[in-house]
Image: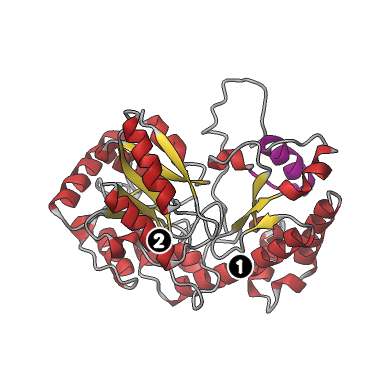
Amino acid sequence: MQRTVAEGRGPVRYGPPAPEPGLPVLPELTAVLAEAARRAAPEPPGGGEPLREAACRHWARRGLATAPENVAAGPGAPALLLALLGAHGGDVMLPRPCPAWWTPQVRLLGRRAYHVPTPAECGGVPDPYALLETVRRVRAEGGDPRVLLLSVADDPTATVPPPELLREACEAAADAGLFVVSDETWRDTVHRPHDTLVLSPAEMLPDRAAVLVDLSGALLPAGWPAAVLRFPGTPRGTWLRARTLDVLTATGALVAGPVAAAAAHALDEPDAVAGRAYAVAALHGAVAGAVHHELLAVGAFARPPQAGRHLYADLGPLRAGLARHGVGDAMELEDWLGGRLGAPTPGGQRFADEPVALRVRLSTGPFLGATPEGRMAALTARDPLLLPHVRGSLEHLGSVLAGLS
């Protein structure tokens, strides 16, 4: 992730990976994968019926009735999103900031990506009024926006949009004639699920919204790529799914057979899987809260983290202190802070934010420990913040930041 001299390195290959839990794979999932290891053939394009039916049950528990014929599976969210955008056509509206991998997907297809500021309360969704104005301006200038890509539990900001803001954004998208793609990968990593209401655009725009879930968010390790995509149950949705399957077939984007078995098992959320997901979310929530406290203590800004394994920090108030170290923009901040912390700290420019803004995404995983044993100790501790290695990592962050204030 460090910037380098020109060596033909494209920004996509060296972009930041999604935050990972940093914990050993759940033994129950390992057993399922091992049992299915004899499956030599991949899943058919879009996934086999057992996997798609498991996805339907997963969504039904979240209030989204779904039929298997309206589901497609693929080897990770990027493969599915690329296929969907390729099938749908048109330019894409995105919030600013947004996940690092979204914009390259749009541009890889030769489409234009237009970023719209997010409201003050949260990330993941565009400000409704700014969205309408941007669409109007883009069309007046000859652009062809047809898709809005948003997230109900956001990377990089780790926030969940309030229901009223999500509804307003969906209404604005409908008024602008946009098809909504909701990335809900981090939905099940909410830190306080009993206090945080997460809604889906598919509940508000059932005929105009698709739902994308990468299972590496809460259920599977990143090394077992699998994701599912829910289409509207309409003739247009059926047509769009068929074209998406064409792209998946042409690109060979198929789920490996053993991974499909593990994915179907995880989507059914047996007690062990659900319990691990809940415990991991709570652990990362506790650490994210402590990191947030360290940031606020030195005058930096950050929205309170609500989901995921990271938070998004604005070190603008520490600009003078950073300038003493030769740091004047997000790219330099990424290099300097990452070197001081010994962990990746991707700058805001990775997330389509303004490079001049001193913003970075801090992942909570590195605070859990450097060994599998230390990370498991954090997971099982009554209060992980009291563990010496966790406390030491947080104090190191605090000392680095304090030196800037």
Q: Which residue is mark 1?
A: 285
Give the alpha-carbon distance from disc 2 to disc 1, as whole Å: 23 Å
Determine if the magenta segment contains residue 332.
yes
Q: What is the x, y in percent for residue 131?
A: 40, 47
Residue shown at the point (72%, 44%) measured from the top left: 338
Amino acid type, residue under disc 2 in the picture:
Leu
In this view of the protein, can residue 158 be seen by the observer? yes
Magenta range: 330-346
Q: Is residue 105 placed above or below 67 in the rendered structure?
A: above
In this view of the protein, can residue 76 be seen by the observer? no
| Left or right of residue 336, residue 278 in this image | left
Q: What is the x, y in percent for residue 218?
A: 48, 62
Report crowding for label 1: few under 14, some 14 to 19, many 20 or more residues within 10 A (C-alpha): many
Which label sits in the foreground, 2 or 1?
A: 2
Classify mark 2: helix, strand or loop.
helix
**Residue 394 picture quarter:** bottom right
Report crowding for label 2: few under 14, some 14 to 19, many 20 or more residues within 10 A (C-alpha): many
Q: Which mark is residue 166?
A: 2
Residue shown at the point (13%, 52%) measured from the top left: 235
Determine if the magenta segment contains residue 191.
no
**Residue 10 picture quarter:** top right
| Left or right of residue 369, residue 127 in this image | left
Amino acid type, residue under disc 1 in the picture:
Gly
Colouring chosen for the image of the structure: secondary structure
| Left or right of residue 3, residue 126 in this image | left
Mark 2 / mark 1, whichever is N-terminal: 2
Q: What is the x, y in percent for residue 106?
A: 39, 36
Give the overall secondary structure of the magenta segment.
helix
Q: Is residue 388 placed above or below 37 in the rendered structure?
A: below
